[in-house]
Image (cartoon, rainbow, N blue to C red):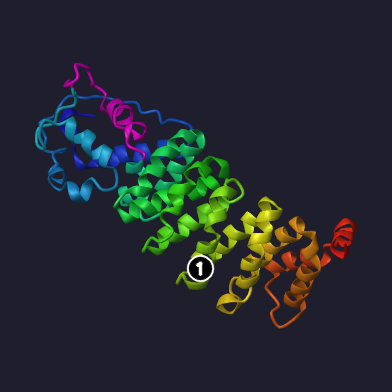
Amino acid sequence: MKHQYFGDINDDRKYGLLRTLQSRGDSKPLVAWMLTHEDGGRDGNRRAYFDDPKTWAKSAPDLFAGLTHLLPSATMPCPQYTGDGTDRSNPWDWLTTDLGDDEMSLLAQLSSQRDDRSEYSNRQVVMQCLDDPDLLAEIAGGLKDKNVALVGDCAEVLTQVAEQHPAWVAPYADALVALLNHKTTRVRWEVMHALALVATSTPMTLAPLLPKLAEMIRTDSSVIVRDYATDAIANYAATGRAAAEHAYPLLKEALTLWNGKHAGHALAGLVHVALMVPALRDELRAIAQEYSLGERRLCARWQKSCSRLASRPKRQGSTRSARG
């Protein structure tokens, strides 16, 4: 290491690589710095990238800001930053401690804000939220942002957390519901997916939404949105007898909508109805046999739902009640 090298474009690449390695696991990299005297050479003066922040600050804005602060200008290297009265002779300490992800806004770490076209950045935020569920409040707040890509990222994070801990996301169900009419398809499907996952934890939120969900199954242009809307009704049906009775006609209708594209999802919900409303089992058994043996035979993935419906015996108590 030489003071004359600090801030060179290779520093940006080097620190970026070290930070990436550190973020990929629980272990921390050990860096053995060896500072040597300046040699008067011209190496280490490639700092023109500081004049193009739009290009170079995209992937790691906090790193770019850190390097900028450690230099009084883009041309004069300054390995120590003493603006706060603290000696920072080791720039790596400052870059990993003061401007690390822990100090960044959680929203700023999302994929859209880092110009990350993959899901990697979002998954990193999900991991943080799984470690500290209180962070979900900031993510839910991002659902109100005007940046559509950011809203989609926030909905995706909530969905991925709900896949493991639906009860953690349930308190934010109202914020998700507010986006059901969003014009962006990705936002609608992430929101609907999250609602489907938390349906069993928030039946009181889902109950008044049933007409809206049914309408979306009939009219939404996205197959994915319609699938998750059907799943939301199906999961709601598992929360109790009254819920199953209200969900039943909607799931039955979903069987035939869009040429039966959502029949498998609807059948999975009808299994819940059979469990909650034994008096309907004969009718449900007939439906299951139609989809198991008839022209509407489904793929193997949904055959289990049909089999469960077809083999579900009617309880004796329910038979007597029906006769009476």
Q: Residue at x 47, y 31 (%)?
A: 27
The quarter of the picture where the C terminus appears is: bottom right
Report if residue 86 is visible in the image.
yes
Q: Residues within 10 Å of mark 1 (few under 14, many from 20)?
A: some
Magenta span of residues: 82-106
Magenta span has 310?
no
Magenta span has 83?
yes
Question: From this viewpoint, which residue is outermost toward the bottom?
Answer: 295
316 relative to 260, above or below: above
Estimate the x, y position of residue 26 in percent, counting from the top left: 48, 33
Estimate the x, y position of residue 279 in percent, counting from the top left: 80, 62
Q: Is residue 121 left or right of residue 197?
A: left
* Secondary structure category for the residue under label 1: helix
Q: Residue at x 69, y 79 (%)?
A: 296
Q: Is residue 244 left or right of residue 56?
A: right
The quarter of the picture where the N terminus appears is: top left
Location of residue 13 (image quadrant):
top left
Location of residue 83 (image quadrant):
top left
Estimate the x, y position of residue 85 in percent, counting from the top left: 19, 16
* Residue type marked 1: Glu
Asked whether 160 or 185 is in front, the reply is 185
